Amino acid sequence: MSATESQNVLIDRQFGAQSDAYLKSAVHAAGPDLAYVTQRIAEISPAVALDLGTGGGHVSYAMAPHAGRVLACDLSERMLATVAEAAAERGLKNVETHCADVHQLPFPDGAVDFAATRYSAHHWTDLPGALKEMRRVLRKGSRAILMDIVSPGVPLLDTHLQGIELLRDPSHVRDFSVGEWLAALEGAGFVLRKVATHRVRLEFQSWVERIGTAEVHVAAIRSLQGQASDSVAAHFAIEPDGSFTLDAAIIEAEAA
Ligand SMILES: C[S@@+](CC[C@H](N)C(=O)[O-])C[C@H]1O[C@@H](n2cnc3c(N)ncnc32)[C@H](O)[C@@H]1O
């Protein structure tokens, strides 16, 4: 089994059981990134829009009123079943679910007019490879909106961030810095059009419950937070109950 295949087994194990929690998650159901992708797709009105790592489906529901078809892709069949049901309940008949790995998409070259991904890329084993695959399926000149938690890029802060993320969810690979994102996008054949950053507050208890973090890992995260230096604690705004605030980015790129 390849590294990507074994990682995909782990992702499915982590997310499959939590589909309802991601559908109901307040953090995932709103935010400036979701507002931005909604605004841009309303302006563009693409025929075919792609949502990579759809999770609870919030990006797909936001895109559906403004696109001909929405291809909601995820590795997890159980996530996709939840999305299909929720889309039907909302009357969104143009949302199609596809069980697919972002590294190997089941769509022809240039078949897609708009692509988005949100809070998923930090699980991917090969960001440059996945972005090349996204570029392959996009028609030349069409837009992609990439949204995720980002590393501040400073090693001191980066190590704390990746440490708590991995303890929370063993399928975490990496929160990339904006610089890593831009290099990977350029290498995949995209031209940068916009970058914006914002902050996302995560309430500790719901953050660990959403993915079913093991108790021993919850204790380790709290211990790491308790022993963090003042500068790490200040950057992540660590609160007495463990809640904290992360950096997130919205990147818009054009398929060159
Ligand atoms: C936090 S959820 C996504 C949240 C969702 N996009 C939203 O905005 O609410 C992460 C999702 O990415 C999916 N995922 C991770 N790696 C993937 C891959 N290589 N291919 C497809 N989906 C992937 C997981 O199965 C999971 O459902």
Image (tube, rainbow, N blue to C red):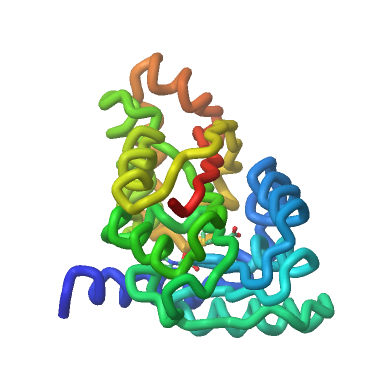
Q: In the image, is 182 to the left or to the right of 18?
A: left
Between residues 201 and 215, which one lies in front from this camera angle? 201
Q: Nearer the viewer, residue 21 or 195?
A: 195
Quadrant holding the N terminus: bottom left
For the residue pair 6 and 17, the one nearer the viewer reads as: 6
Q: Residue at x 35, y 44 (%)?
A: 186
Residue at the far top in the pictured view: 230
Residue shown at 77% from the left, 83% from the top: 93
- Location of residue 202 by image quarter: top right
State the image coordinates of residue 59 (x, y, percent, origin top left).
Answer: 65, 61
Image-based side of 188 in relation to 25, left or right: left
Q: Is residue 26 placed above or below 3 in the rendered structure?
A: above
The percent position of residue 136, horizontal first and vertical second, equals 39, 67
Residue 143 in sight here: yes
Spot occupied by residue 252 in the image (x, y as percentages of width and height)? 54, 44
Residue at 37 percent across and 36 percent down: it is: 177
Residue 220 can be seen in this image: no
Q: Residue at x 48, y 77 (%)?
A: 16
Q: Nearer the viewer, residue 230 or 253?
A: 253
Q: Position of residue 234 (x, y in %)?
A: 47, 18
Q: Is residue 103 above or below residue 180?
A: below
Is 118 left, or right, of 152 in this rendering?
A: right
